[in-house]
C-alpha cells in the first residue's frame, strides 16, 4: 500500500495559496488542507481550478488552537463558500452546535465532511476514542478525525491499535500530536488510517509534531524495502 498524505498549509493571500498548492503538487500530496484562519479575501474558485488534488477547507477557531476571530456566521460562511467553489472536503468540529445542520447543507453540495475532535493536553484512552468515533459517525461524517497529544510512547501504541481495529469500519484519521506523537503520525496510514498529515517542508508546520512530506515519503520507501 501507498500511504495517503495530506499536506496542511496556512496561507494569507491567494497568491501565496496558489504557490503552496503548486509545491504540494510537486511533492505528490494526496490531499491539501487549506487552513483559512488567516486567509484574507480568498478566491476559492481560483484555488480549486489550479489543482486536481482534493482540497480540504479548515477554519479553526481560537478554541481549536486556530486564528479565526470572526463571528460564527462568518466562520460558517467562509467554509460554505469554499464548498460552493470546488473544495471537496470541509472540516467541522464535533463540538459545533450546528454540526448536523451544516453536514446536511454540505451533502446537498456533494461535499464530503471531516468531523474532528482534538485533545491538546494529553491522550485518549481506547474507551474515549470509541465514544468519539461513534458520535462522529452518528453525525453523518464522511471522515472521522480523532487527534490527541502524546505524552509518551505508549500513547502512540494505543492509537495505532485503535486504528487497526476500527479503520475498516469508516474513513478514520487518527494520530497523536507533539514530538512524542511523531511515530503515530507516520505509521497511522500503515495501520489503516485514511490519510495522515504532513508539513510541506520543515519550518512550515501547522501543528506540533508535523513531519515534512518529503521525510514521510522517504520513511515509507524504507518501510517497503
Image: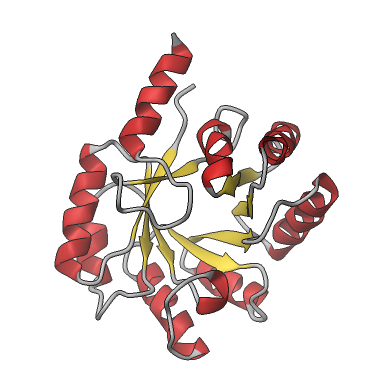
Q: Residue at x 27, y 65 (%)?
A: 11
Picture quadrant where residue 163 is located:
top right
Total number of numbered discs in the rendering: 0
Q: Is residue 184 left or right of residue 67?
A: right
Position in image of residue 58 (x %, y %): 44, 66
Display colour scheme = secondary structure
Position in image of residue 47 (x %, y %): 23, 62
Quarter of the image with the C terminus in it: top left
Q: Residue at x 60, y 61 (%)?
A: 115
Position in image of residue 99 (x %, y %): 64, 74
Picture quadrant where residue 74 is located:
bottom left
Q: Is residue 149 left or right of residue 66?
A: right
Picture quadrant where residue 68 is located:
bottom left
Q: Nearer the viewer, residue 210 or 152?
A: 152
Q: Nearer the viewer, residue 26 or 182?
A: 182
Position in image of residue 197 (x %, y %): 45, 46
Amino acid at each position: 500500500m501507498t500511504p495517503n498524505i495530506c499536506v496542511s498549509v496556512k496561507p494569507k493571500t491567494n497568491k501565496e495559496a496558489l504557490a503552496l498548492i503548486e509545491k504540494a503538487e510537486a511533492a505528490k500530496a494526496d490531499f491539501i488542507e487549506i487552513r483559512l484562519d488567516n486567509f484574507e479575501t480568498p478566491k476559492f474558485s481560483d484555488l480549486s481550478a489550479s489543482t486536481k488534488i482534493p482540497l480540504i477547507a479548515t477554519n479553526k477557531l481560537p478554541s481549536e488552537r486556530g486564528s479565526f476571530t470572526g463571528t460564527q456566521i462568518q466562520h460558517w460562511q467562509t467554509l460554505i463558500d469554499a464548498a460552493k467553489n470546488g473544495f471537496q472536503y470541509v472540516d467541522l468540529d464535533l463540538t459545533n452546535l450546528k454540526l448536523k445542520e451544516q453536514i446536511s447543507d454540505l451533502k446537498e453540495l456533494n461535499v464530503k465532511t471531516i468531523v474532528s475532535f482534538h485533545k491538546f493536553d494529553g491522550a485518549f484512552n481506547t474507551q474515549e476514542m470509541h465514544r468519539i468515533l461513534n458520535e462522529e459517525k452518528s453525525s453523518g461524517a464522511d471522515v472521522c478525525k480523532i487527534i490527541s497529544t502524546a505524552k509518551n510512547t505508549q500513547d502512540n501504541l494505543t492509537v495505532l491499535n485503535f486504528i487497526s481495529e476500527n479503520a475498516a469500519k469508516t474513513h478514520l484519521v487518527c494520530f497523536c500530536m507533539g514530538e512524542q506523537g511523531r511515530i503515530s503520525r507516520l505509521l497511522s496510514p500503515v495501520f489503516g488510517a485514511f490519510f495522515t498529515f504532513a508539513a510541506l517542508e520543515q519550518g512550515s508546520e501547522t501543528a506540533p509534531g508535523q513531519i515534512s512530506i518529503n521525510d514521510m515519503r522517504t520513511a515509507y520507501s524504507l518501510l517497503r524495502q
